[in-house]
Image: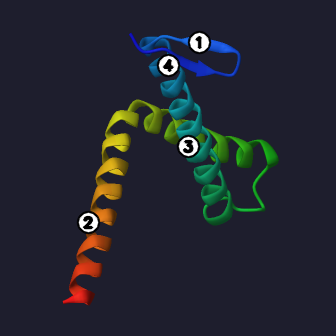
Amino acid sequence: MARYRLGNRYLSQQEYDAEMDWKWVWGLFLVGSLLTGWLVHAYLVNPDWHKAIRFIVTTVPALAVGVVLVKLRHYIQILLGLAVILLIAGVVIGVISSVI
């Protein structure tokens, strides 16, 4: 059985996987919410609107996108892994083609 050291704690495989999953959850939620909130506020919100309406129009879509990204995190992990593999393959093919 694998043991992982994380700070002053020793974790089993299941505990370590849960810890890494929470990092993905918070990271995706935070990045998705902040980016969506910034884009909505910058491009869709009218500065003449009342402050409460601007707040609601900005935060509701940001939170919704954050939750959707958290729900789709397994697919996002697969897509990021595939992107890394394709990047490595592209670099290898580029190096080989430049040598030939």
CB under 8 Å between discs 4 and 1: no
Closer to us: mark 1 or mark 3? 1
Closer to us: mark 4 or mark 3? 4
- Taking the spot 77% from the left edge, 62% from the top edge, the residue there is 47
How many other residues sit within 10 Å of disc 2, few (<14), some (14-19) or many (≥20)? few
Does 77 appear above or below 43? Answer: above
Residue type for callout 1: Tyr
Which residue lies under the disc numbered 3?
61
The label on residue 16 is 4
* Structural distance between the alpha carbons of marks 1 and 3: 39 Å
Give whichever of 18, 48 is nearer the camera.
Answer: 18
- The quadrant the C terminus occupies is bottom left
Q: In this view, does 98 lie to the left or right of 65?
A: left
Q: In this view, does 72 lie to the left or right of 4?
A: left
Disc 2 element: helix
* Structural distance between the alpha carbons of marks 2 and 4: 30 Å
Disc 1 element: strand
Q: Position of residue 68 (x, y in %)?
A: 44, 36
- Taking the spot 58% from the left edge, 51% from the top edge, the residue there is 36
Q: Where is residue 12 in the image (x, y as percent from the top left)?
A: 47, 11
Does 74 appear above or below 81? Answer: above
- The quadrant the N terminus occupies is top left
Residue type for callout 4: Tyr
Disc 3 element: helix
Which residue lies under the disc numbered 2?
89
- Taking the spot 45% from the left edge, 21% from the top edge, the residue there is 17
Q: Position of residue 11 (x, y in %)?
A: 54, 12
Which residue lies under the disc numbered 1?
10
